Amino acid sequence: IKSYFTGSRRLSNIFWALTVSLGGFGFFLTGLSSFFGTNLIFFSDSKELSFLPQGIVLIFYGTVGSILGVFILLTVWWNVGSGYNEYNRDLRKIKLYRKGFPGKNRELVFTFSFEEVKSIKLRIEEGLNPKRQLLLCLLDNREIPLTGIEQPMALNKIEDEAIKIAK
């Protein structure tokens, strides 16, 4: 049995990456406009801004925002966090595969035998930021998440998946 899940390649992450990048670039251009004394953005008037201290602060926040936006875009491009869980009854093994950031440890593969597993745990947190998460509990008291970080699944669906895994 294999269960796949998405990583960071979601519409909400793309939206925030573009929003933060464009906002940061706008702040940066406004700060540069205050330095040069001319409008680099056609729809704004930055002649009333003084370079010290407003322009410097705008350039700083623009640089940080642009870097953060590019980081989020790269995270989406690399699809960090995606992967699958494979439950092999014949070999009595559980294989967890995840994609990370580029480098020598980009692909993370964890393998556990059925004998190492103590239980399957369902963690439910309601409230402003609800979480419904399946955890693989091992004999050495480690808890390894089996579900992704996407929108919380319906309670009956996550229960069905837990039952399917437990069998």
Image (cartoon, rainbow, N blue to C red):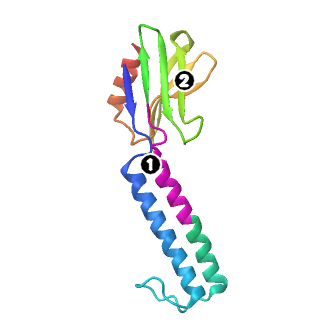
Look at the image and give the residue range highlighted in magenta: 65-83
At horizontal 44% and vertical 85% (from top left) the residue drawn is 44
At horizontal 59% and vertical 34% (from top left) the residue drawn is 105
At horizontal 45% and vertical 49% (from top left) the residue drawn is 76
* Predominant secondary structure, magenta span: helix
Q: Nearer the viewer, residue 159 or 114?
A: 114
Q: Residue under circle 1? A: 77
Residue type highlighted by circle 1 = Trp
Q: Is residue 15 above or below residue 116?
A: below
> Is 75 one of the magenta-colored residues?
yes
Residue 123 picture location, percent across and down = 48, 31
> Is 162 one of the magenta-colored residues?
no
Distance, label 2 to label 1, CA atoms, is: 23 Å
Mark 2 residue crowding within 10 angstroms, few (<14) / some (14–19) / many (20+): few
Q: Residue under circle 2? A: 110
Q: Quadrant of the C terminus?
A: top left
